[in-house]
Image (spheres, grey):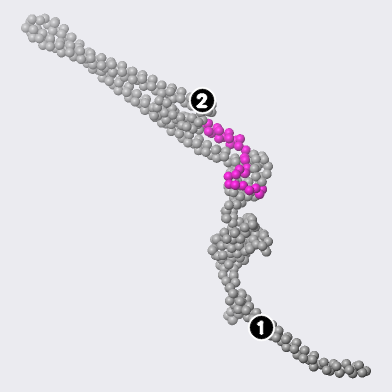
């Protein structure tokens, strides 16, 4: 009992000290509360200031994919044929000009060889006719025929053309020589007639002088009349032969003129025939040259080559001996040396917000998002009209953005491949967070206040 009284008295004595401690603790908590309120007020105020002043990007988000500036390049075989060998596989890396597929070339080689022989023959004929036209002593064959003279058939034909050249030349020369001999004979005959006529004229002159004297003597009776008549008869005969000589000379001159004309006509006819044959030979050679160009093109195209450096995709031929129809697409080449672009589908209702030249942020979602930065780009093209998605059937405008060189430098260890998905954000301007939060409400209030 006594112990309880003592404890009670001690508690009463210690009670003031406890109250003092409580008052001290209470004072310290109020300071922290005030500090907390200041932090809240300052934080809220700072947030409101930031939301009212700090600019945020606004724009249009859309999905896209990586492409190249020239898209895929189709590899096709124009004429069709049989596959002889397939030299690449799906995913192979090739260079421009590399042989991808070799087609069977037996028919192409046969056609080209036949046409080439015909072309050489036509050129040899043309060379021979040129020599005949120019009155050359020998045929000057072009270098292409000299190089092809190792082919037995061509060598034989060149020799045959030489024989034809000399034979035709000899025949013409013989014909012209015969005509020239006839002309020379007639000229000699004419000269003889002219000499005979001259002598007869001199003889006639002498007889006429005799007749003058004899006629006087005959009148006086010193000469018999028969003598006078004999001289007159002789003079008449000489006149007759002179007239005959004149006629023969005229005929000879006429024959000479005819023979000269015949010679000229023969030469002209020969030249005309040569020109006509040369024209036909040249036309034939030109036609064969054009055909040969096409056949050589076909022969060269039996080696299907890559149109660009890149990667083989979409290989459609797998078997040797496969028959390809004309224009068949064998594979595609995805170019590796073209710069990368990103293609996106812009919804039609946002077309008025986007234009070429706007900056765009690109996020390559195929990579780790935590390690892959946003890459800068620029809108380079928007389709002139809306397109229709083949899968969804929804309309859209095609948007193309170019990856900037600075953006590519941000991805040094990452291989960007065509077809990769990309998240695009086209920046159309800036606005504050407060504007972002309040604009829908303000727009709604304006609409509500304008209603009747």
Residue 397 position by quadrant: bottom right
In this figure, which residue is indicated by the disc labeled 1?
38
> In the image as oriented, which residue stretches furthest toward the left?
220
Q: Residue at left 20%, top 13%?
A: 199
Q: CA distance from mark 1 to mark 2?
A: 114 Å
In front of the other: label 1 or label 2? 1
Quarter containing the N terminus: bottom right
As displayed, is residue 48 above or below residue 17? above
Front residue (pair 360, 61): 360
Q: Can residue 325 be seen by looking at this rendering? A: no
- What is the secondary structure assignment of the residue under circle 2? helix
As displayed, is residue 214 above or below residue 69? above
Q: Are marks 1 and 2 in contact (CB under 8 Å)?
A: no
Q: Residue at left 10%, top 11%?
A: 212
Q: Residue at left 39%, top 27%?
A: 135
Crowd tier of the residue under label 1, counting other residues whose Cα lies within 10 Å: few below 14, some 14–19, many 20 or above: few
Q: Whole-percent x and y of residue 286?
A: 47, 36
- What is the secondary structure assignment of the residue under circle 1? helix
Q: Is residue 93 magenta?
A: yes
As displayed, is residue 322 above or below residue 73? above
Front residue (pair 409, 214): 409
In this figure, which residue is indicated by the disc labeled 2?
156
> In the image as oriented, which residue stretches furthest toward the right?
1
Q: Earlier in the sequence, mark 1 or mark 2?
A: 1
Q: Whole-percent x and y of residue 41?
A: 65, 82
Q: Whole-percent x and y of residue 435?
A: 60, 76
Magenta-colored span: 90-118
């Amino acid at each position: 009992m006594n112990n309880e009284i003592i404890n009670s008295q001690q508690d009463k004595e210690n009670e003031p000290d406890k109250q003092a401690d409580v008052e001290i603790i209470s004072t310290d908590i109020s300071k922290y509360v005030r500090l907390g309120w200041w932090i809240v007020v300052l934080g809220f105020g700072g947030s409101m200031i930031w939301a009212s002043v700090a600019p945020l990007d606004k724009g249009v988000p859309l999905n896209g994919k990586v492409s190249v500036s020239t898209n895929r390049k189709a590899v096709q075989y124009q004429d069709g044929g049989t596959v002889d060998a397939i030299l690449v596989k799906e995913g192979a890396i090739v260079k421009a000009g590399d042989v991808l597929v070799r087609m069977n070339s037996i028919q192409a080689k046969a056609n080209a060889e036949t046409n080439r022989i015909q072309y050489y023959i036509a050129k040899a004929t043309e060379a021979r006719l040129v020599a005949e036209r120019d009155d050359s002593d020998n045929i000057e064959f072009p270098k292409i025929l000299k190089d092809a003279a190792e082919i037995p058939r061509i060598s034989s034909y060149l020799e045959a053309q030489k024989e034809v050249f000399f034979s035709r030349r000899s025949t013409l020369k013989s014909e012209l020589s015969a005509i020239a001999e006839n002309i020379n004979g007639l000229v000699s005959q004419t000269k003889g007639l002219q000499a005979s006529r001259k002598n007869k004229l001199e003889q006639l002159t002498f007889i006429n002088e005799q007749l003058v004297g004899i006629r006087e003597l005959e009148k006086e009776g010193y000469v018999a009349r028969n003598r006078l008549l004999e001289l007159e008869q002789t003079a008449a005969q000489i006149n007759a032969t002179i007239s005959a000589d004149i006629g023969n000379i005229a005929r000879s001159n006429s024959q000479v003129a005819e023979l000269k004309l015949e010679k000229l006509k023969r030469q002209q006819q020969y030249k005309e025939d040569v020109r006509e044959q040369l024209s036909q030979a040249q036309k034939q050679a030109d036609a064969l040259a054009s055909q040969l160009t096409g056949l050589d093109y076909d022969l060269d195209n039996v080696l299907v080559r890559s149109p660009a450096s890149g990667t083989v995709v979409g290989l459609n031929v797998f078997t040797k001996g496969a028959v390809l129809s004309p224009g068949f697409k064998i594979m595609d080449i995805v170019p590796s040396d073209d710069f990368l672009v990103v293609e996106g589908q812009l919804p039609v209702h946002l077309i008025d917000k986007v234009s070429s030249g706007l900056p765009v942020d690109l996020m390559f979602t195929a990579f780790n998002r935590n390690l892959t930065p946003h890459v800068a780009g620029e809108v380079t093209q928007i389709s002139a009209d809306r397109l229709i998605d083949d899968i969804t059937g929804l309309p859209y405008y095609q948007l193309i953005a170019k990856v900037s060189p600075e953006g590519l430098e941000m991805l040094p260890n990452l291989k960007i491949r065509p077809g990769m998905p990309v998240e695009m954000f086209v920046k159309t301007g800036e606005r504050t967070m407060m504007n972002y939060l309040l604009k829908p409400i303000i727009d709604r209030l304006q609409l509500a206040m304008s209603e009747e």
